[in-house]
Image (tube, grey):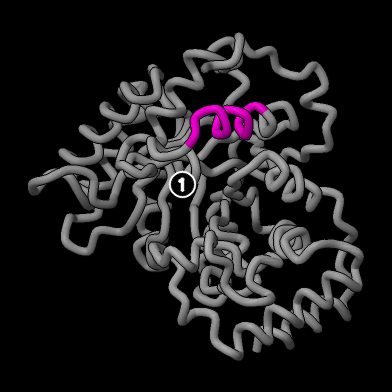
Amino acid sequence: MIPPIYKASDSRYEAGMQYVRCGKSGVRLPAISLGLWHNFGGVNNFENSLAMAHYAFDHGVVHFDLANNYGPPYGSAEETFGLMMKKSFLPYRDEMFISSKAGYDMWEGPYGNWGSRKYLMASLDQSLRRMNLDYVDLFYSHRYDPETPLDETLQALVDIVRQGKALYVGISRWPLEAADYAFKYLKERDVPCLIYQGRYSILDREVATSGILDKACDAGVGFIGFSPLAQGLLTDRYLNGIPSDSRMAVGNHLKQDVLSEKMLATIKTLNTIAGQRGEALSDMALAWILADKRVTSVIIGASSVPQLATNLKALSSAPFTQEELEMIDAACR
C-alpha cells in the first residue's frame, strides 16, 4: 500500500547537510548523495525504498544518482524513482538534482551497450520515460568505450544538452588520458564536463594515485566518489566473519576471496582507529573521503532508514589529526 502524499520536512535545509561547489560550475551538490544502485530495484520493497528516499530528502540530500541498468532487473530502479516522483517528489522537482547514466549492458543487440551515439540517446529517452521526467540534471557516459571514437561519444553528450534532455554532462570511470581529452572537448563546445565519477575509498585510492583527481580539479571539474564503504567492507559487517544475509555471502558484486587475512586485519585496525575517534568505521570512512578538498560529494547506498541515518552522521565527524591520517595510511599498506 502506497503511503499518503508526502510533505517534505520544513527543516530539510537545516538538518546539517553541507553543499559543495561542483568544480567551477554554479552547481552545489550535497556532500553526501544517495545512490540507487542497490535496494531500489523491482525486487525490493517499494515502501522501504520510498522511506529511504523521504528520509534522505528530509535531511538535505537533494542529489539522487541512478543509471539505466540499476535494479535488478535492468531499468527498475529508474521505474521505482519514477513512481516516487509521481507519488511524492513532483512538487519538489526543482529542488532536486537527478542524474542517470548509460554505458553498460542494457538491452539485446548491438545498440544496447557501450558509448555509441545511438545507444546513449536511445537510453536516455528510455530513462526519462521510466523516471517520469522531462530532463535529467546530469547525464553520464557510464564507462569509457575503447572502440567507439571519443568524438562520437562526447558529441552525443553535447547534443543531449543542446536538446534540453540534460542540463549537465559527466563521465564515469574513464582513464586519465581519455578523461583529459573529454574535459577539453566538452569545454571547447561550451558544454563543460560538470563532474567525474569514480570509485574512491580508504581501501581503493586509484583515482588519486592515477592522477584523475588532480586532473579533474585542474580542469575545473567536480569529483564524486562511489563505493566509499567498499561495498560494506568498511563497516562492522565483516569484522567477525561473513553474515549469511550479506552482499558477500550472495557474491554478486563482492566476492568472498576479497576478505583475505590481510584485508581482515586492515579492516580491524581501521575499526580500532575509528573507535578511538568515538565513531563507527563507516562514519570514519565517509569522513576520510569528504576531508579531501578535491571531492565534491560522495555517493552512499543504504538498505534501511537506520543505516542511512548512521551514514549521515559522518557530516559531523571531527577533523582528522595528522597522526590519525598516518595511522590510516599505515593500516592500508
Q: Residue at x 43, y 28 (%)?
A: 80
Determine whether 145 is above or below 242 in the image.
above
* Residue 99, magenta (yes or no): no
Q: Residue at x 61, y 10 (%)?
A: 4
Residue 306 position in % (x across, y down): 72, 43
Quarter occupied by the C terminus: bottom right
Relative placement, left or right, of 228 versus 118 is: right
Splitting the image into 4 quarters, where does residue 323 fall? bottom right
Q: Residue at x 45, y 45 (%)?
A: 193
Determine whether 49 is above or below 195 in the image.
above
Splitting the image into 4 quarters, where does residue 262 fall? bottom right
Residue 6 position in % (x across, y down): 64, 13
State the residue in front, 189 or 213. 213
Relative placement, left or right, of 157 versus 98 is: left
Q: Residue at x 76, y 66 (%)?
A: 281
Q: Is residue 318 visible?
A: yes
Q: Which residue is mark 1?
A: 37
Residue 240 position in % (x across, y down): 68, 76
State the residue in front, 185 or 133. 133
Q: Which residues are magenta?
A: 45-54
For the residue marked with disc 1, what is the amino acid?
Trp
